[in-house]
Image (tube, rainbow, N blue to C red):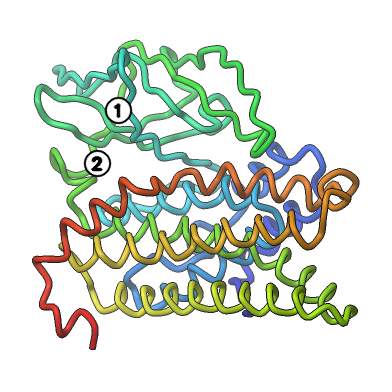
C-alpha cells in the first residue's frame, strides 16, 4: 500500500510534517505550490492525483483537509474552461446549504453580485478565494469569489471540534460582493467531475488510515498473539480493497465515466473508504489501547481528525442513493 506524489507538492508535504500550529504554514505552502503540481482528474493521470492526496493525508489529515478542496476548485475551474488561478491564491469550495440561510446571486449592469449567508465555509476567513453555490431564482449556480473583497465577513463560530480543530467551519456573510459565474445553472452538480471530486476525498480518508495500519502491523509482528494478528490481517484486507476501488475509479475517470455509472462508482468507493476508516479506528482502540490516544499526540490527533473528516460520508443516505441508481445499470456488466 504505497503512494507517490508529484515533486511539486514537496514544500506542502514538508509543512504538513513539521508544522505544529498547522493551518497557516500549510496555507502559505499551498499558495507557493504550482497549480499544475497535481494532475487534474480525467486527463490520464488520475491515479497520481489520488496518490498525492493519500500521501499528504498519511503525513497529516489536517493537511489533506486543507489541500483537497483547493485541488477540487482547480478541477472545477478547468472543467468550466476557466484558466488556472494565479499562484499565491488559496481556494475552497462551499456548496452546503442549511435551513434559515440563503445566498442569492443578482445580475447587474456590471456583472454578478452575491448577497446573503453561506454556511459551512471551512477556513472561509483565511482563504483568498472560493467557489460558492448561490440561488439565481429557482436555479442553483456556482460562482468564483474573492474572499478578501469588501462585503465579505466571517461570522463568529464556536468551533469546539477536537478533530480538525484548526479547520474551522463557519458561515460567511456576503453583501453585494462581485462574483464570476462558473458554468451554467445546475452545472456544478450535474457534471461528472462532481462525483470525481468525492472520490478524491475518499483517497484522503484512505491515506489517513495507513499510518495506523503500519503501527498495528508492527505491534502484531512483535507479538505472538493470534487474535492481534487476525485483526491486522482483516484490516489489511479492508484497506487493500479500498485501495483497489480507488485504482479502478482512477481508470474509469480517465476513461470518461459519467452519469449513473459515475454516481455508483463514487458511492461505492466512498463507502469502501469510510468502512476502512471505521474498522481502522476500532482497531486502534482495541489493539493500541488508551495509551496511544492519551499519550501519543500524533495518534490522538490523527484519530480525531480522521473520525470527523469521514463524517462527510452520509452512511445510509448515500446507500439509498446508490441503490436507487442500480436499476439503470446492466446487471451482468455491472459485475463482470
Task: Give me the C-alpha separation between circle 2 and circle 1.
Answer: 9 Å
**Does 223 appear above or below 280?**
below
Asked whether 62 or 293 is in front, the reply is: 293
Q: Residue furthest bottom?
A: 336
Which picture quadrant has residue 45? Answer: bottom left
Disc number placed over residue 53 in the picture, else none: none
Q: State left or right for residue 87 relative to residue 302.
A: left
Which element type, helix, strand or loop, lies under badge 1? strand
Q: Position of residue 241 (x, y in %)?
A: 49, 77
**Does 180 appear above or below 224?**
above
**Does 10 appear above or below 294?**
below
Name the residue rendered at 62%, 49% in the picture: 306
Which picture quadrant has residue 278? Answer: bottom right
Q: Around disc 2, counting alpha carbons within 10 Å, would you say few (fewer than 14), some (14 to 19), or many (20 or more)?
A: many
Q: Position of residue 182 (x, y in %)?
A: 24, 41
Q: State left or right for residue 205 relative to residue 255.
A: right
Which picture quadrant has residue 11? Answer: bottom right
Q: Around disc 1, counting alpha carbons within 10 Å, would you say few (fewer than 14), some (14 to 19), or many (20 or more)?
A: many
Which element type, helix, strand or loop, lies under badge 2? strand
Asked whether 250 or 185 is in front, the reply is: 250
Residue under label 2, please give it.
Answer: 182
State which quarter of the image contains the C terminus.
bottom left
Q: Position of residue 180 (x, y in %)?
A: 27, 33
State which quarter of the image contains the N terminus.
bottom right
Residue under label 1, please give it.
Answer: 179
Amino acid at each position: 500500500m504505497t503512494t507517490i506524489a508529484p515533486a511539486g507538492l514537496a514544500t506542502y508535504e514538508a509543512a504538513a510534517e513539521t508544522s505544529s500550529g498547522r493551518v497557516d504554514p500549510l496555507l502559505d505552502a499551498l499558495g507557493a505550490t504550482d497549480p499544475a503540481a497535481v494532475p487534474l482528474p480525467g486527463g490520464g493521470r488520475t491515479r497520481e492525483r489520488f496518490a498525492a492526496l493519500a500521501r499528504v493525508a498519511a503525513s497529516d489529515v489536517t493537511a489533506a483537509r486543507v489541500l483537497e478542496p483547493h485541488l477540487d476548485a482547480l478541477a472545477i475551474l478547468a472543467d468550466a474552461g476557466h484558466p488556472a488561478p494565479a499562484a499565491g491564491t488559496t481556494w475552497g469550495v462551499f456548496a452546503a446549504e442549511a435551513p434559515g440561510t440563503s445566498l442569492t446571486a443578482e445580475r447587474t449592469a456590471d456583472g454578478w453580485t452575491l448577497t446573503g449567508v453561506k454556511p459551512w465555509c471551512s477556513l472561509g476567513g483565511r482563504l483568498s478565494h472560493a467557489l460558492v453555490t448561490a440561488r439565481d431564482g429557482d436555479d442553483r449556480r456556482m460562482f468564483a469569489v474573492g474572499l478578501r473583497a469588501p462585503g465579505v465577513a466571517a461570522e463568529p463560530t464556536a468551533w469546539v471540534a477536537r478533530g480538525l480543530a484548526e479547520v474551522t467551519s463557519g458561515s460567511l456573510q456576503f453583501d453585494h460582493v462581485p462574483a464570476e459565474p462558473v458554468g451554467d445553472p445546475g452545472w456544478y452538480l450535474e457534471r461528472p467531475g462532481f462525483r470525481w471530486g468525492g472520490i478524491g476525498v475518499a483517497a484522503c480518508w484512505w491515506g489517513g488510515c495507513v499510518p495506523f495500519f503500519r503501527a498495528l502491523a508492527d505491534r502484531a509482528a512483535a507479538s505472538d498473539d493470534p487474535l492481534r494478528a487476525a485483526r491486522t490481517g482483516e484490516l489489511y484486507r479492508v484497506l487493500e480493497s479500498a485501495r483497489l476501488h480507488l485504482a479502478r475509479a482512477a481508470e474509469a475517470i480517465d476513461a470518461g465515466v459519467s452519469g449513473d455509472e459515475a454516481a455508483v462508482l463514487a458511492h461505492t468507493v466512498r463507502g469502501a473508504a469510510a468502512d476502512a476508516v471505521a474498522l481502522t479506528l476500532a482497531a486502534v482502540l482495541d489493539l493500541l489501547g488508551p495509551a496511544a490516544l492519551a499519550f501519543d499526540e500524533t495518534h490522538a490527533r490523527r484519530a480525531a481528525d480522521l473520525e470527523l473528516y469521514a463524517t462527510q460520508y452520509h452512511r445510509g443516505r448515500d446507500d439509498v442513493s446508490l441503490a436507487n441508481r442500480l436499476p439503470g445499470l446492466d446487471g451482468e456488466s455491472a459485475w463482470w
